[in-house]
Amino acid sequence: MTTEIKYRTGGCLCGAVKFSVKGQMREVIACHCGQCRKTTGNFFTATNASTEEVTINEDSGLAWYKSSDVAERGFCKLCGSNLFWRAFGSDTISITAGSLDGETGLHIKEHIYVADKPDWYEITDDKPQFKVWR
């Protein structure tokens, strides 16, 4: 039995950060925590992949911000695009779903930190909802 190896590309709005992913990516998780809302202006949708399978092809705009004691966020310092989230010491990196190019075949798997969700939108799909990260 063989597993199809996917190859996807993505990047920021201005092109100063470009990346490619060769391999499997997790289905999308929607995070409704306050920190994610502050960095995106809405809830945060991300997939992830093994760090070894992610290649940064253009990094002239890439910057990292230590957003907590456990993680940092990667973004373009030129156009402001939010691109990555990674926990310190992890072998995976989360990638914003909206930064991927073209059709991805990915779908929202679940919603996390729904206890932090603001009152101005509703979650209307039938995906599982968790008050915090499990």
Image (tube, rainbow, N blue to C red):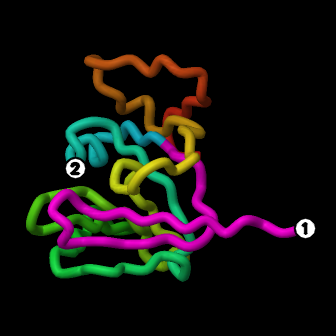
Residue 39 - label: 2
Q: Position of residue 3 (x, y in %)?
A: 78, 66
Magenta range is 1-29
Q: Quadrant of residue 10?
A: bottom left
Circle 1 crowding by C-alpha within 10 Å: few under 14, some 14–19, many from 20: few
Q: Nearer the viewer, mark 2 or mark 1?
A: 1
Which element carries disc 2, helix, strand or loop?
helix
Residue 102 magenta-highlighted: no
What is the three-letter code of the residue carrying label 2?
Thr
- Badge 2 or badge 1: first in the primary sequence: 1
Q: Quadrant of residue 49?
A: bottom right
Question: Which residue is painted at 9% across and 67% down in the image?
Answer: 78
Q: In the depicted view, which residue is nearer to us: 134 or 92?
A: 92
Q: Residue furthest front?
A: 102
Question: Which residue is painted at 55% across and 30% down in the image?
Answer: 129
Q: Is residue 3 left or right of residue 59?
A: right
Q: Quadrant of residue 64?
A: bottom left
Question: Which residue is painted at 39% across and 56% down in the image?
Answer: 101
Residue 20 magenta-highlighted: yes
Q: Position of residue 130 (x, y in %)?
A: 55, 34
Question: Which residue is painted at 42% across and 29% down in the image?
Answer: 115
Q: In the depicted view, which residue is nearer to us: 90 or 40?
A: 40
Separation of marks 2 and 1 at Cα, in angstroms: 41 Å
Residue 1 - label: 1
Residue 32 against residue 124 in the figure, above or below? below
Q: Position of residue 121 (x, y in %)?
A: 32, 19
